[in-house]
Image (tube, grey):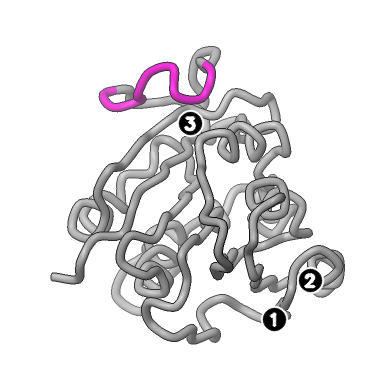
Amino acid sequence: MRIQGKLRLGYFPLPLEEARRIRAHLRFPASPFSAIDPCIGDGAAFLAITGGACARRYGVELDAHRAEQAAAVVDEVIHGHCFQVHCPVESCELALLNPPYEWISGESRSERTERVFLAHTYRWLKVGGVLILVVPAHVRECPEILAAHFKAIRLSRLTDPESVLPPGGGLGRAAEPLGARPIAGRRYCQTAGLVGKCRRRL
């Protein structure tokens, strides 16, 4: 992990302005549904995205202080590591995934945390459920999972200055508004937001 990431424990929260933009692209059912954020932080972005919806909100947060903050705005928070949490398969209609931006060192190889978090959590979504995935735009380790298990995928660059990664983190030119144009084909850019619907299991 880079020095800046170590100082923040890989914590780069989704700016509230970006959360509000994402919320503007979502339509929630009138009936109750379950939403989860396995890297919830203080819960502010998750609340901004699900605010006004008839949602049961759940979160997981490793940092004790942020877990306490999140507990004030969602229905239930687990203070612990996402990888130690096992949620029933197909139990949620919405998942916000903004994992730490770093590498995990394994016995035989290293993997991006974004891919590991996605592989651990995507099964929690019901068929037709919505995934919101926030990752550095240069990360290329998630497409096979997304292509196999999601449809109607929309990819956008985030524009808030807080969405810019630290120096050396894959910065790009000034970003367009959410949804203005896709980032496919750009090698280096800022943080990307993805929204996709879970398809039937293969």
Residue for badge 3: 170
Q: Which residues are magenta?
A: 177-185
Mark 3: which secondary structure?
Answer: loop
Residue 122 horizontal side relative to residue 94, left or right: left
Residue found at x 53% / y 18%: 177
Rendered position, 191 above or below 75: above
State the residue in front, 156 or 196: 196
Rendered position, 154 above or below 135: above
- Alpha carbons under labels 2 and 1: distance apart: 7 Å
Mark 1: which secondary structure?
Answer: strand
Residue found at x 30% / y 66%: 127
Residue for badge 2: 67
Bin the neighbour count of mark 3 within 10 Å (Cα to Cα): few under 14, some 14-19, many 20 and up.
some
Which quadrant is the N terminus positioned in?
bottom right
Residue for badge 1: 78
* Res 187 quadrant in image: top left
The answer to whether marks 3 and 1 mark residues whose Cβ atoms lie closer than 8 Å is: no
Residue type, label 2: Ala
- Alpha carbons under labels 3 and 2: distance apart: 29 Å
- Alpha carbons under labels 3 and 1: distance apart: 32 Å
| Disc nearer the start of the sequence (2/1) | 2
Residue found at x 82% / y 74%: 64
Q: Which secondary structure is most common in the magenta stretch?
A: loop
Mark 2: which secondary structure?
Answer: helix
Residue type, label 3: Gly
Residue type, label 1: Ile
Residue 18 at what x, y percent from top left? 63, 34
State the residue in front, 72 or 134: 72
* Res 41 quadrant in image: bottom right
The answer to whether marks 3 and 2 mark residues whose Cβ atoms lie closer than 8 Å is: no
The answer to whether marks 2 and 1 mark residues whose Cβ atoms lie closer than 8 Å is: yes
